[in-house]
Amino acid sequence: MLTVVDHPLLRRDLTILRDKATPHGLFRKTLSDAAAILAYEAMRGIVLKKRPVETPLEVTDGYDLAEEVVVVPILRAGLGLVDGFVRFVPEARIGHIGMQRDEATHQPIDYYANIPGGLDAAHVYVVDPMLATGGSASAAIAHLKRLGATNVVFVCLVAAPEGVRTLHAAHPDVPIFTATVDREIDENAYIRPGLGDAGDRTFGTGK
Ligand code: PRP
Ligand code: URA
């Protein structure tokens, strides 16, 4: 399942993020704001359990989350989306997976993983601003499934059609939420029109 989240504030945020004149401080803040809108939509599938809640006047029905939420950013750029999720679910556990694309082959190389236990009973949100070839997301999700994850959602800001196809083929059970599906990836595996290198623009590194 692919959901392209459509909200006027998200369109405005995406424009700020695409703009090459946006400095990294504003880029980081806007990425976090956009992530909150994506998180709000992606977390509609969360399951609740009922409990009584006592207001100052009487007892009524209330709800708690029925399952743990685990957010897993794909390092580095995925870190920029975490705040957008934990502002709604501050008790979420955060796992980290380090993936770096090889500049020549564009294949992901995993260099770090630190994932909380209990994945089998958790809603797992894998977050990364960019879904280009789909290699990094597919490998990260395969890693989480090997650790027991069964309920995984992938959330990104910009997807390429190739990345959507690859991720759907590798993990047909994983819904994808994105703000846009862009035209294509180029010969350097950058998304066009895209927003450039999300990691460098978030952290103020690169040229
Ligand atoms: C970027 C991005 C994704 C990946 C997407 O990370 O944040 O993780 O590329 O490309 P793919 O779909 O073709 O695998 P990058 O490797 O540039 O690392 P960084 O986040 O550390 O900058
Ligand atoms: N990674 C990025 O940061 N940007 C792209 O366009 C593709 C992969």
Image (cartoon, helix red, strand yellow):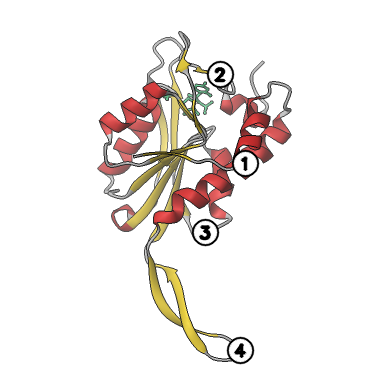
Tag 2–tag 3 contact (CB < 8 Å): no
Label 2, on which residue? 193
Per the model, the C-alpha gap separating discs 2 and 3 is 32 Å
Disc assigned to residue 102: none
The disc labelled 3 sits on which kind of residue? Answer: Val
Please give the residue where the numbered disc 1 appears in the rendered image: 8
Quarter of the picture containing the N terminus is: top left
Mark 1 burial class by Cα count in 10 Å: few <14, some 14-19, many 20+: few
Quarter of the image with the C terminus is: top right
> Disc 3 marks which residue?
89
Q: Report if the beta carbon of the residue with label 3 is closer than 8 angstroms to ligand 1.
A: no
Report the side of 50 relative to 20 (left or right).
left
Q: Distance between the residues labelled 4 and 2?
A: 54 Å
Identify which residue is drawn at 58% across, 39% down: 80
To which residue does mark 4 refer? 56
Query: Which of the pair 81/41 is nearer the observer?
Result: 41
Q: Is residue 81 above or below residue 52?
A: above
Is disc 2 surrounded by few (<14), some (14 to 19) or many (20+) residues within 10 Å? some
Q: Is mark 3 on a helix, strand or loop?
A: loop
